[in-house]
Each structure stands twice: as structure tokens, then as C-alpha cells.
Image (cartoon, rainbow, N blue to C red):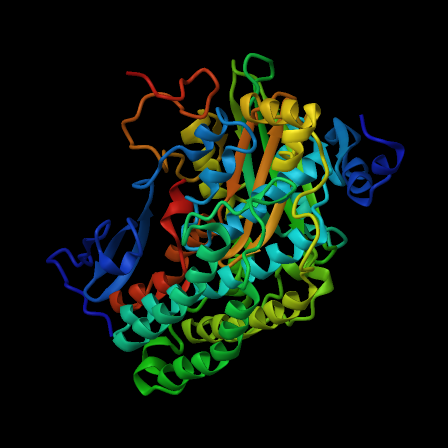
Amino acid sequence: MGEPESQDHAVVRALRGYDPASVAEVIEFRGELTIVVPRAHLRRACELLAVEPDLQFTFLSDITGVDRFPLEPRFEMNYHLVSLARRERLRLKVRAPSSDPVVDSVTPVWDGANWHEREIFDLFGVRFDGHPELRRILMPENWEGHPLRKDYPVEGYR
Amino acid sequence: MTTTVQTPTGAAQTMVLNMGPQHPSTHGVLRVLLEVDGETVVKAQPDIGYLHTGIEKSCESKTYSQVITLTDRLDYLAPLSNNLCYVLAVEKLLQLEPPPRARYTRILLTELTRIASHLVWLGTHAIDLGAMSVFLYCFREREEILKIFEMFAGQRMMTSYFRIGGLAAEPPAGWEDRVARFVETFPSRIQEYEDLLTRNRIWLGRTQGVGYIDPKMALAVGVSGPSLRGSGVPYDVRKMFPYAGYEEFDFDMVVRKEGDVYARYLCRVAEMRESLKIVKQAMPRIPSEGPIRADAPGIVPPQREKMKTEMEALIYHFKIFTEGFSPPVGEVYQAIESPRGELGFYLCSDGTPKPWRVKVRAPSFVNLQALPKFVAGKMIADVVASIGTIDIVLGEIDR
């Protein structure tokens, strides 16, 4: 759980102001702020963060998939955002269970999310709803399985 | 002028041209599918993954110290930048502070890396656009830098010189003279390249007004590094989120407004001069004596002498190399300014000696994504200039 000061953070306040349910958890670790967002709120929260004049998280650094196998919800997407205006970094975290590995695409918010989401689809098998062309990017088109899943052997299937 | 072939039905006829993966101007194994209408590109579609080696997956079965060797292989033109970014991420996770001698040596070497990487970029970019001799001059100077790396790390390219908590080995005897000699001669060498290119009519014709990157589009895609600063956006990780002690150094962020291939060329050339400034400032700050690794038993390997006299040191040494160390549970993201832009390492620790997840935010991967957006509607010959200007390294794109 986050400490009292991180709960007070301007970004957290702005998100809570838009919808109290859009912040599930605030984590502060090693000076980095992580906001866990429920799956249903992801797209709207991202739009708010990118557009809101006080926040301006206009730069999407990276999206990282994490497989928590065998825990559930198994998949975790981490969105690393930068606000050049505020000189701040922020991590958004969204979780998806293995029974339904789908999250909303944020490509409409940041164009650059396109390839990051394709990479996660390719290597983790998580689908992104509303993505313009969700197909493999690093592995061959006809590859079977998703290599970065924890139940995929390091040497591959032989 | 577009040359459109009209079919009887009146629809325009386009053709798909396959560029790469063995095309010399694609700097590695990049394949670009070009849909062309005569000489004009209608649509460009990069196809990547030819160099995918699963480095991120391999990292998960290595201990934290073993991963360093893999990071060299990402951006093989700037291995020390990768080393730095990774060790900073692990040090952030462990809350470990390297001693001053290691800190300044790291900055010195990463800035030399930036110069070496920009030299390769300049040489190959010039050769792509038909200027043969610049390539030879650039590689001459790069060789000097690689010799410095060899002195320090014993390796010219796959250095692995930065370690968790410090450096792999003592800085070698006589390194000051070697670096000083380079620092002395290099400004006149940059002048040489500029004499050959900056006002060269052919160079201007091939680069000015070509490959315009719109700052809004660049930000939306996440383009970083000189490719972003060439379009007037002042974002340099060294200035925005200082790391490793860059806040103590005096240097300028180079920003150009024009946004074309020529602006990015000027940006990178000026950046080499700025890096040289940092190198000059870092040299006198490196103490000639003192520890090169942090004092963190159980994480940083003990000194040889201690292992021969102290039982604990011997035990720690054995434990570090047989099972590694276990950082606390948590996740960190560390970004640095690599020669190509924002390089980031995301580490997720589950409290075991092996990282649960290592993710590399490769600047080339993101920068390449912008390529289709700024070559559409331009000539095929400009695609070559456009690929060169974003300075991609396929090793880190495909990972």
C-alpha cells in the first residue's frame, strides 16, 4: 500500500477527481509512482492523463507485459508515461486474468502504443481491444505459442 | 511529379517493392515493404524480427550479474550505454551507490561511447548518400575510442565493464594520456567532417527538406534522442531526469527546429562536441586512487586480497558466484539517454536471485515506428536517407 504522501499526489488526485473508482491502488517504490487502474477504466484514464492541461502525459515511453504465472490475475501491463511539462514519470498498471486476457488498446491516445501492444500480443498473447492491426511483430507469423509466458520453456518446444 | 499508371478502369496502379532484409542501406536486417506509385512511396511498412534472439527471455534464467553480458548485445554500437542503464536499474532496486571513482569513469566512458556511436552513424549515413571518404575518416577516429575501451575493459566492443556497484576492473595505468590525446585531436577531426559535408552542395541537396519529422507526430509516437531534438522538442534524459551524476556537468542540449535530415545531422555533430566537453570535465574528477566498487558484502564481489585473509569474504565470493544475490521484491524503471534516445530497463524482482522480468525499452524500436509516417508521399531515394537519419540498430529493435 502507498504511503499517505503518494495518495496526495496531483496525478492521483486528478484521477480520483475524474472517477474515484479509477484508482485501485497507489504504490510508491524507490521514488517511482505506480497507479493500478481497473481494466474498465484504462482508456478513459489514459485520455485524461494525456489531455488534461495540468498533467500532459503526452509521451508514452514504453508498455511492458509481465506474466505472474501461476498467480491470478496473471497478466500485468505497465505503461510508462512521461510528462515533459511536469518533468515527471508515472507507471500505470493494469491486470488481466488468463481466462480473458484482453485490455483496451491505448493506440488512439498515443500513436506509439501500436508496436508496443503488438509486441505484447506477440510475446504474451494478450489481446488489445480496438488496436488497428493486431498481429505478430517479432516472431514469424505462423509461430505457435507466446515465448515470454512463464510456462513457455526457455529452449522452446522441440 | 507523380507518374501514375492509369488502368482502363481509371484506378491508380501501385507496385510493392521489397527493400531488405539484405539491403546495405538498412543497417542490419531491416525489411521495409514499400508500396510505390512510380518513384513515389505510397506506403512503407517495416518488417522486423529477423534478429530476434529472445534476450529478454534469456535474462529470466540468469542471475542479476550474468545479465550484464547480454546487455552488450542489444545496441552493439553503444554497449557501455546498455551496461550503464542496466546496472543503474539494479542499483536503484538495491539502493546501492557506486563510489566516485566508478561514477565518473562511467560517465567518461559512456560519453566516449556516444561519440563512437555517432561516428558510425555519420560514416554509414554519408556512405548511404554517396559520400565515401567520410566513412573512412569516421572509422579512423572510432578505432581510437575502441582502443581506449580495450585498455579499460579488455574488449573493443562487448565490454561488460560496468558492474553492479561499480566497475569490473581498475582503470588501467596510462589511460589519462590516451584519453587526453583523443580529446586534443578530436575537435579538429570533427571540423574535417564538417568541411566535407556541412556546406557540400550534394549533401545539402540530399538532406535539406528531406525526411521531415513533425514534432507532434514524433511525440505521439514516442520518438526520442537526436531524432526528436532535431524537430525542436527539448527532451534529453540527461537534462530532464539526471542520472549517474550528470547534473554535475556543464553541457548544452542541442535542439534544432527544422526537423529534416540535415537538422538531425547538425544535431548529432554538435552532440559529439558536447560529449567531448563532458569527457574533458570528467577526466580531472576521476580520483587516481580509491575503491572502484561499493562496499556491499553479499552483492559486490570482495577484493582478492580479502578473500585470502578473511573467511567472510571467501564465503560471500562463493555465494555470489554460485547463487547470486536476492534483491527486494518490487519493480523499477531506469532510463538513460543512449546515443539513439531514451533507453530504459524495466526490472521486476520477485525476491529470488533471478529477475522475474527484464524489459528493454529500445529507442530504435520506437523511432523506427515513425518511419512509415514520414516517408509516405516521398521519393524512394529519400527512404534511404530517412532510414539512416533515425540511426537504428537492429540488435536492440529485435532483441
Instruction: Kindly indicate the quadrant of the structure image that contains residue A91.
Output: top right
Residue B105: x and y in percent read 61, 57
In-front residue for pair B83/B291: B291
Report the residue that reaches farthest toward the right.
A4
Instruction: Look at 32% across and 50% down and name the residue there.
Output: B45
Q: Is residue B77 visible?
A: yes
Image quarter where the C terminus of chain B lies is top left
Q: Position of residue B167 (x, y in %)?
A: 59, 46
Compared to B169, does B146 lie above or below? below
Query: Which residue occupies the foreground of this view, B124 or A17?
Result: B124
Farthest left residue in view:
B8
Q: Is residue A68 above or below residue B214?
A: above
Q: Residue B7 versus residue B287: which sits nearer the camera?
A: B287
Q: Position of residue B76 (x, y in %)?
A: 40, 50
Q: Can see residue B117?
A: no
Residue placed at 55% from the left, 59% from the top? B173
Determine whether B288 is above or below B140 in the image: above
On screen, B378 above or below B325? below
The N terminus of chain B: image quadrant: bottom left
Question: Which residue sits at x=37%, y=55%?
Answer: B372
Q: Total label count?
A: 0
Q: Quadrant of residue B389?
A: bottom left
Which residue is located at x 10 percent, y 58 percent? B8
Question: Where residue B345 sits in the image (x, y, percent)?
Answer: 57, 41
Name the foreground residue: B167 vs A60.
B167
